[in-house]
Amino acid sequence: MKKVYLDYAATTPTDPEVIAAMEPYFFEKFGNASSLHAYGQEAKKALEDSRQTLADFIGVKPEEIVFTSGGTESDNSALLGVVYDLEKKGNHIITSAIEHHAISEPANFLEKKGFKVTYLGVDKDGLVSVEDLKKAITDKTILISVMHANNEIGTLEPIAQLGKLARNKGIYFHTDAVQTVGHIPVNVDELNVDLLSLSAHKFYGPKGVGALYIRKGTRLETFLRGGDQERGRRASTHNITGIVGLACAIELCKNKMEDEIKFQSALRDKLIKEIPARIPEVRLNGHPTQRLPNSVNFSIKYIEGESMLLSLDMLGIACSTGSACTSSSLEPSHVLLAIGLDHETAHGSLRITLGRWTRQSDIDYLLEKLPLVVQKLRAMSPLYPVKENHQ
Ligand code: PLP
């Protein structure tokens, strides 16, 4: 059976070149980067070279990078770290209604602890408005966190404008760039952000490693207490293999990005054109143009996303109904509800995300099979208005 992976926003395969770069650090070069002997110094060099590679890629200084265990840790640390440090200054944070759970859950936690949290709504395309942010800021606001691109619908948020507003008001701004780093150019200065999260497994690096950019001078409570790794910001022996893999993955993305954007956005646009042409009553979710080059999300009326997913899986096609982290829940996606879909429509959503190994033939296979799957499921659906039912 043909196998087609179209769930790159959930995770990406580790590029074989990344695996080759990591390999020596498991055995030959296994040292602890905090050790003073030659083994340690070899690991330390790999650590600092990797930090430089990442720093150059996002346009920052190496000392502004803290390596973490991934996007969730970076997001939690940014939110909780700033809030714990600045709680005497204010008790209000602002975020959006469509953040990943790695932001919305710590925000909910802070709310339970007595902080005030404003969740900015979005328009029908998933965009946060600068005007809404302006209105939400108070003299107690200490942090604003809005994601760079949404993981479910692919909309790119106007971070540069939102960040500029925050900077003019003297408020820290964090962005979750887990879905953008490695896929589109990300330059911290152009985005006007003070904190930025990223995760290697979303750009062909290994799982369990990521980073948080922290602009020099930003006040932030220590994430993990223990040793003095990462300038005392985050204790624990460095995951050198993972960090070397992250840096190698970044290098590959730098070299391939322009071609990948061109190729993937052409396939994405083919899906945007062909799916509604082949299947009636389909809605594209997310902004029509201001979106990630590798991501589409459709609501397909009268069927359940899960049934569609399983039927496609039986044909060898892997897609998603939304975020992988919530796909086991039967609640409709908070993102789709936030853009104004009703529960029923939100339940019938399909996210298709492309990547380095997606080929034209994979898209053609999906375009051939999806209408058949939808037709079959609609025929079984009590919700589908079959003509005879109305006679
Ligand atoms: N933020 C976004 C937007 C994501 O898509 C994800 C993963 O799906 C995360 C954060 C969490 O990242 P990680 O899996 O590296 O913890």
Image: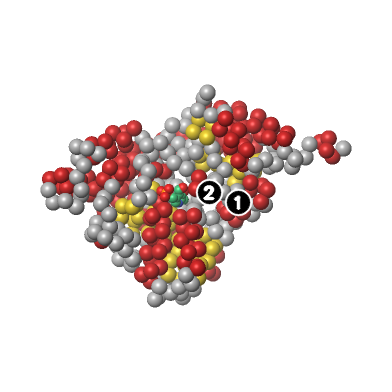
Compared with 332, 320 (above or below) is above
The residue type indicated by label 1 comes to: Glu
- So how many labels did they put on this image? 2
**Which residue bears the numbered disc 2?**
326
**Given the current orientation, which residue lies at the most extreme right position?**
391
Question: How crowded is the residue under tag 2: few (<14 C-alpha within 10 Å), some, or many (20+)?
Answer: some
Q: Position of residue 120 (x, y in %)?
A: 54, 62
Query: In which image quadrant can residue 281 be found?
Result: top right
Q: Residue at coordinates 57% horizontally, 49% vertically from top-left? A: 329
**Given the current orientation, which residue lies at the most extreme left position?**
37
Question: How crowded is the residue under tag 1: few (<14 C-alpha within 10 Å), some, or many (20+)?
Answer: few
Q: Looking at this view, is 245 or 177 the one in front?
A: 245
Q: Earlier in the sequence, mark 2 or mark 1?
A: 2
The residue type indicated by label 2 comes to: Thr
Residue 359, labelled with which disc?
Answer: none
Q: Is residue 162 visible?
A: no
Q: Position of residue 240 (x, y in %)?
A: 26, 45
Report if the CB atoms under discs 2 and 1 are less than 8 Å apart: yes
Q: Looking at this view, is 74 or 64 the one in front?
A: 74
Q: Is residue 162 left or right of residue 198?
A: right
Residue 331, labelled with which disc?
Answer: 1
Q: Is residue 175 left or right of residue 302?
A: left
Q: Residue at coordinates 65% horizontally, 42% vertically from top-left? A: 304
Q: Residue at coordinates 57% horizontally, 60% vertically from top-left? A: 121
Q: Position of residue 286 (x, y in %)?
A: 57, 48
Q: Looking at this view, is 122 or 290 the one in front?
A: 122
Q: CA distance from mark 2 to mark 1?
A: 9 Å
Q: Residue at coordinates 39% horizontally, 76% vertically from top-left? A: 88
Query: In which image quadrant can residue 327 be found?
Result: top right
